[in-house]
Image: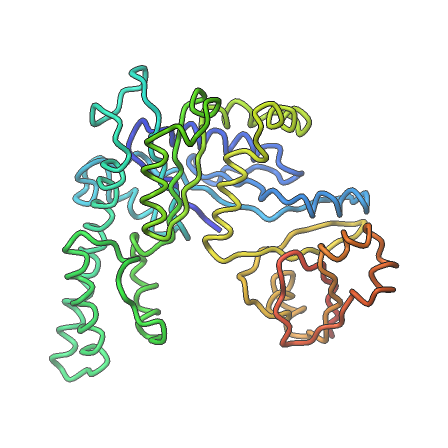
């Protein structure tokens, strides 16, 4: 899973990315790696995996991971190449979803590029550049389809019809997420995926607040409430976060971080909430494998069947799939982490090829080589 962090300059993107990279450096034995200067990998927090590793005293704990790409600050005119915008927009196209960092803190020590703090205006600025970039992509593809349609290509003609509507939609300043695509049209879906439309990607708004806001209570921040309302109207996610605090606590030990969260009266860090929201937004879940040698969380899309889940471990597992021995973590926990109790209550199940894997399933796959 790859998330692109976007936003105007000086809204806290780099601070948030620093927090991400610092957190990744010591995340649950997963070695932080910098694929490029602006790419970092961080573990997905999962208390279930932590508990399994503790029970087994495992040699290796491997969490699911998220890749974050820090896209340089976009500016007005990015879609026309301002500020090297085309290069950065290209980076976003490679991402699965967008994290839009929005400044929701006042203060004059950090100068806003527009001279004042107005998160809704900032969101519109970024949205406009992404829409204009998408419009150019759609218009170029539409021209090719129209040309093919003139030669008698009926499929091209049909595609040109809805593509022209999409161009008009984008031209009105509306993002592609709001366009009524046909969910049953596989050819349309394939073409949309191929174009990599920026404004069709799922989005999370990271409302970056000050440490003072964190202490006073986020519901007292009118900027955050405005972004939250906008996100709700779009069907998007909005996560309150203090990038500066996240950066400060990124290298805390688990005990120090727990003490800090307790002192602040919050259950999880903003970064943890952001990662979990990303999982939910993309329809992802984790299944688990455990043992002395390794305990691991595997990322799959919700609705994945057992053979395809097995294929995440190794292609041989999918090809030779026989059955899966499954117990859900919640049942395991309810049995006080006793596999004997799980079996006595009939909570370990044997599942076949049609079984749809559930979040938190602990699975042992049986297969033919």
Q: Locate residue 86, reporting x and y percent.
A: 24, 44
| Residue at the (69%, 74%) spot, across then down | 321
> In the rendered image, is residue 139 in sight?
no
Residue nearest the viewer, comparing 247 with 228: 228
Quadrant housing the C terminus: bottom right
**Colouring convention used in this rendered image of the protein:** rainbow
Q: How many marks?
A: 0
Give the image location of residue 168, x and y in percent.
14, 61
Which residue is pictured at 68% across the width and 75% down the height? 320
Indicate left or right for 356 with 86 as reference.
right
Instruction: Please say whether residue 246 is visible from this viewpoint.
Output: yes
Relative to 106, does residue 357 appear above or below in the rendering?
Answer: below
Please identify the residue farthest to the top as the structure is shown: 109
| Residue located 20% across and 27% down the image | 114
Between 144 and 132, the residue placed more toward the observer is 132
The picture places residue 351, in percent across and down from the top left corner, at 71, 73
């Amino acid at each position: 899973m790859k998330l692109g962090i976007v936003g105007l300059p000086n809204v806290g993107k780099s601070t948030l990315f620093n927090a991400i990279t610092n957190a990744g450096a010591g995340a649950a034995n997963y070695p932080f790696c910098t694929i490029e200067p602006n790419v970092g990998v961080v573990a997905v927090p999962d208390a279930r995996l932590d508990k399994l590793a503790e029970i087994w005293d495992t040699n290796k704990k491997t969490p699911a991971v998220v890749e974050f790409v820090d896209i340089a600050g976009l500016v007005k005119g990015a879609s026309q190449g301002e500020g090297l915008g085309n290069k950065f927009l290209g980076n976003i196209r490679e991402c699965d979803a967008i994290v839009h960092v929005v400044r929701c803190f006042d203060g004059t020590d950090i100068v806003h590029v527009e001279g004042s703090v107005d998160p809704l205006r900032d969101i519109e600025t970024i949205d406009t550049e992404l829409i204009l970039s998408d419009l150019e992509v759609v218009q170029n593809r539409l021209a090719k389809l129209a040309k093919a349609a003139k030669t008698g290509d009926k499929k091209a003609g049909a595609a040109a019809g809805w593509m022209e509507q999409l161009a008009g939609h984008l031209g009105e300043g509306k993002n592609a997420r709001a366009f009524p695509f046909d969910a049953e049209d596989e050819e349309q879906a394939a073409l949309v995926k191929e174009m990599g439309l920026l404004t069709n990607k799922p989005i999370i708004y990271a409302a970056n607040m000050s440490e003072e806001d964190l202490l006073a209570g986020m519901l007292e921040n009118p900027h955050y409430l405005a972004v939250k309302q906008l996100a709700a109207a779009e069907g998007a996610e909005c996560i309150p976060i203090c990038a500066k605090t996240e950066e400060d606590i990124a290298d805390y030990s688990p005990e120090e971080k727990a003490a800090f969260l307790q002192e602040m009266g919050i259950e999880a860090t903003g970064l943890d909430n952001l990662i979990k929201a990303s999982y939910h937004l993309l329809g992802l879940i984790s299944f688990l494998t455990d043992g002395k040698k390794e305990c691991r969380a595997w990322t799959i899309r919700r609705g994945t069947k057992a053979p395809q889940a097995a294929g995440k471990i190794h292609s041989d597992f999918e090809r030779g799939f026989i059955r899966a021995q499954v117990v859900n973590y919640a049942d395991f926990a309810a049995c006080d982490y006793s596999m004997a109790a799980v079996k006595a209550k009939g909570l370990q199940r044997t599942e076949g090829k049609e079984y749809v894997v559930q979040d938190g399933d602990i699975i042992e796959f049986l297969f033919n080589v």
